[in-house]
Image (cartoon, rainbow, N blue to C red):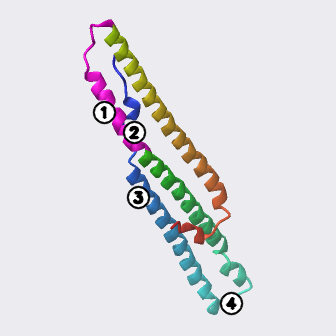
Amino acid sequence: MTVTYDALLDWPDAASIDSEAEGLIEKGESFYDAVAEAKGAWDGLSGNYEAPEQQQLLSALDPALRNAESATGATALVASAMGGFASALQELEPRRQQLIADAEAFNLKGCPVDEAEHAQQMAEGEQLRQSINTLVEEYRQKIKGLHHASGRNQQRGRLLGPQCARLG
């Protein structure tokens, strides 16, 4: 009997996800800052420009600033979900490593000739397989949680401003 553990291989690296989440926050903040700076410069035109359409022209970047606020809030919320997923992966990692080692060790065992030992080895293999399946299901649930959190956060992100981008 061989215990397959392919589903435990090639999981993403939690530290990389966490680092990317931090980078996402920084990009959201710098995006907002760039739009706010452009709007400030645009608003500075008021002293040099007079025309009937002056107010329309000077308010042209108002929607862009509101959208930048929403985008910044959304990036912070998605980054928060990513950070939560990275933490969940870190919690699962020791069990994943142990199950890989256990499966490799189990697969190196020879087939016992004694019927009782064979039955015991089969039971051990089945228990190991169930442990692997349980961990893989937990991992899948964490992925689903990330997807749900990201979807909720994208909807809520429209309502938030740049002050929500700072998570810690």
Nearer to us in this view, 79 or 125? 125
Q: Is residue 100 magenta?
A: yes
State the residue position of label 4: 50
Furthest-right residue in view?
52
Nearest to viewer (mark 3 / mark 2): 2
Does 131 sit above or below residue 72? above
Question: SS at mark 2?
Answer: helix
Which of the two labelled residues, at mark 4 and mark 1, occupies the earlier sequence position? Answer: 4
Categorize mark 3 by other alpha carbons within 10 Å: few (<14), some (14-19), many (20+). some
State the residue position of label 2: 95
Categorize mark 1 by other alpha carbons within 10 Å: few (<14), some (14-19), many (20+). few
Furthest-bottom residue in view?
47
Highlighted magenta segment, given as a residue range: 92-115
Going 59% across and 50% down the picture, which residue do you hit?
Answer: 149
Amino acid type, callout 2: Arg
- Side of 3 where 110 appears, left or right: left
- Side of 122 where 84 appears, left or right: right
Q: Which mark is residue 19?
A: 3
**Residue 167 coordinates in the image, percent (x, y):** 53, 66
Amino acid type, callout 1: Ala
Q: Are marks 3 and 2 in contact (CB under 8 Å)?
A: no
Going 41% across and 50% down the picture, which residue do you hit?
Answer: 14
Going 36% across and 33% down the picture, which residue do you hit?
Answer: 99
- Side of 35 where 160 appears, left or right: right
